[in-house]
Image: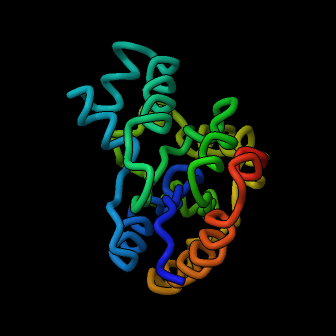
Amino acid sequence: MGVPDVNLYLVGFMGTGKTTIGRAVAQKLGFELLDSDAEIERLKGKTIPDIFAQEGEPAFRQLERTFIEAGHPARHAVVACGGGLVVQPGMLDLLKSKGVVVCLHASLETVLKRTQGNRNRPLLNVEDPFERIRALYTAREPIYRRSGTLVLTDGRPLHDVVAHVLRIYRREAADFAHASPIEKATP
């Protein structure tokens, strides 16, 4: 059997390495990497903070849904999903109907370290970013935990994480390719 061509969706909290890991995995697979936030910025001609400020978070979440429904290739893509994308009602099922979903995880301390000083994260433009990270993560964790195989990214060399994600992808992509359309839509 050939190499699977099923899309890989990397989900998880901000700062867990979705884009960095995604870039390396896409290169190994010969796939295109798409970062949902970067694609939305490109299509709108605005930064994420500007979209949040001018149109609000609900408008941004609708842009995420539109991107997943129809704004990217159906095959040969690794999609690094924004941290809140999978949390929206129905999005996890939608992602699972389109490909393999892997959830990246890191400690809250690592997330804070990786996101400090990044002005492109409107949800962290608050007085106490760590408290905001803790509150957001607490609210989102149950969805992340059931979204796909969890892969820890902190304290591990990049090549180890990439190899782990590739093993999961290859196993689950083969299963996905053989599932019926009804099974794909059922989490």
Q: Residue at x 58, y 50 (%)?
A: 13
Between 95 and 142, the residue placed more toward the observer is 95
Q: Is residue 180 left or right of residue 74?
A: right
**Above or below — where is 24 with respect to 35?**
below
Q: Is residue 135 left or right of residue 43?
A: right
Q: Where's residue 153, x and y in %?
A: 56, 71
Q: Where's residue 186, x and y in %?
A: 78, 46
Quadrant in the rendering for residue 185: top right
**Above or below — where is 167 with respect to 46?**
below
Between 93 and 6, the residue placed more toward the observer is 6
What sort of colour scheme is used for the picture? rainbow
Q: Where's residue 158, x and y in %?
A: 45, 80
Q: Is residue 107 left or right of residue 52?
A: right
**Above or below — where is 159 with respect to 59?**
below
Q: Where's residue 147, x and y in %?
A: 71, 52
Quadrant in the rendering for residue 106: bottom right
Q: Residue at x 61, y 58 (%)?
A: 101
**Which quadrant does the N terminus fall into?**
bottom right
Number of numbered markers? 0
**Above or below — where is 22 with respect to 47?**
below
Q: Residue at x 53, y 41 (%)?
A: 129
Between 96 and 14, the residue placed more toward the observer is 96
